[in-house]
Structure formats: structure tokens, C-alpha cells
Amino acid sequence: MNLEAYYDYCLAKKGVTEHFPFNDDALVFKVGGKVYALSSLKQWENGEPVVNLKCDPERAQELRILYEGIVPGFHASKKHWNSVSVNQDVPDILVKELIDHSYELVFKNLIKKIQNEISKL
């Protein structure tokens, strides 16, 4: 997966916006104002892309055992976030599935009013 594919995949979801809240390197995708994916542009440029994604805690533990490229989230809650090394031992299809999972976790925790507004888009 390259940066353009990652960017397009994340941004194509309903109600998603992109931000650079920390600096001009950390690309953050939000749904309903809540972060669901973030990544360093410099890491993509250096060929070592890593994406932080929210994950169900039990599944997060399982994935960390199965894949060297999935570790507890960098600068995030280690229980609820994983750092996923793209283009290592984690297949692109799984990366997309984990992006979907993160989006869904964040979306379902939004207040109903915001969920309904996003669903109408």
C-alpha cells in the first residue's frame, strides 16, 4: 500500500475529515471530530509507514501475537490503539480491514445526532 492508496481509502469513508493538529507531519483522519487513524508523512516518504488505528482490546492483543508489524499504539492508549507497520508482514487487505474496524469503533461511540448526520451524507 502506498500513501495515496491509504489517503484515498481513509478519506472515502462517510463524514471523514483530514487534519494536521500536531504538526505538518502527523496526518490525522477524524470522523465526527474524533480521531480514527493517524500516520507520519515522513515515515511514508522514508518507506517505513506506520498507521495508528483504534482496535478492540482483545483483537488488538491477538493481532500483536500474529504479526510483528502490529504493536501497541505509539503515543496512544496501548489498550485501545495499535501501530500497524504497512508493507511489512501485515497484508494490505488486513490493513484496510483494520482501518474499517477503527472507523466503525469511533463511529459507534459518537452521539446519535452526529451518527445520523453522517449517515445522511
Image: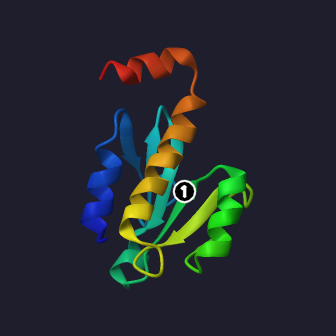
The residue lying toward the viewer, choosing from 45 and 12, is 12
Q: Which of the 4 image quadrants contains residue 13?
A: top left
**Residue kind at label 1, given as amino acid type:** Leu
In the drawing, does residue 57 fall left or right of residue 111? right
Q: Which of the 4 image quadrants contains residue 76?
A: bottom right
In the drawing, does residue 70 fall left or right of residue 61? left
Q: Is residue 75 visible?
A: no
Percent coordinates x, y for residue 53 in the rendering: 54, 56
Q: Is residue 14 visible?
A: yes
Q: Residue at x 47, y 74 (%)?
A: 90
- In the picture of the structure, the residue carrying the numbered disc 1 is 53
Indicate the secondary structure of the residue bearing disc 1.
strand
Q: Residue lying furthest bottom in this view?
A: 46
The residue lying toward the viewer, choosing from 113 and 1, is 1
On-image quarter of the N terminus = bottom left
Percent coordinates x, y for residue 99 in the rendering: 45, 53
Rendered position, 71 above or below 115: below
Percent coordinates x, y for residue 16 in the rendering: 37, 39
Q: Residue at x 37, y 84 (%)?
A: 47
In the drawing, does residue 16 fall left or right of residue 82? left
